[in-house]
Image (cartoon, helix red, strand yellow):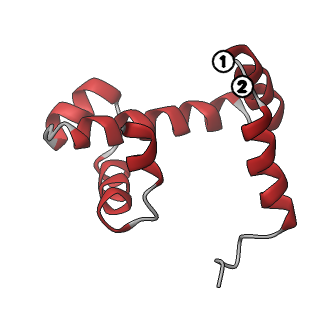
Amino acid sequence: MPDAWHDEQTDNLCGAFLRLGTPEEVYAFLEDIATISEIKSMAQRLEVARLLNEAKTYPEIVQATGASTATISRVKRCLEYGAGGYKSVLK
């Protein structure tokens, strides 16, 4: 059974990302659909995941990204127990 947030609207959002073919199209879509702050937060979390995947320490990650230890912990939990999304994009 899908998670409660899986519905027609989120299916459409996922489909929209899949239809984008270039980085420029992705930038344009992100700029239209999210605030710059939201985009930067997602980018920071992805970088935190990349650094955790490289076995960097929390202090190293804070230094490199400016992320809080709470954010690092949340991303680490997702890497360890999440749906596998980070792992898919970090391959």
The local crowd at label 1, few if under 14, some if 14 to 19, many if 20 or more residues have their Cα within 10 Å, is few
Image coordinates of residue 66 in percent, x first then y, are 34, 30
Residue 53 tag number: none
Q: Quadrant of the N terminus?
A: bottom right
Q: Which of the 4 quarters of the picture holds residue 40? A: top right
Q: What separation in Å lies between label 2 and label 1 (alpha carbons)?
A: 5 Å
> Which residue is label 1 attached to?
23
Please say if 57 is above or below 6.
above
Q: Position of residue 45 (x, y in %)?
A: 43, 41
* Badge 2: residue crowd in 10 Å (few <14, some 14–19, many ≥20): some
Q: In front: 37, or 43?
A: 43
Residue located at (72% from left, 70% from top): 6
The image position of residue 8, as x and y in percent, is 86, 65
- Residue furthest out toward the bottom: 1
Q: Residue at x 76, y 26 (%)?
A: 31
Residue at the spot x=81%, y=37% of the render?
33
Q: Could you tell me which secondary element the residue under label 1 belongs to?
A: helix
Residue 58 placement: quadrant: top left
The residue labelled by disc 2 is: 26
Q: Residue shown at 71%/71% (left/top)?
A: 5
Marks counted in the figure total 2
In-image side of 18 versus 50 (left or right) = right
Q: Is residue 72 left or right of residue 85?
A: left
The answer to whether 60 is drawn above or below residue 25 in the figure is: below
Q: Amino acid at mark 1?
A: Pro
Query: In the image, 40: left or right of 11?
Result: left
Name the image quarter holding residue 63: top left
Task: Please provide percent x and percent y for residue 23.
Answer: 66, 18
Amino acid identity at mark 2: Val
Q: Which image quarter is the C terminus in?
A: top left
- Asked if marks 2 and 1 touch (Cβ < 8 Å), the reply is yes
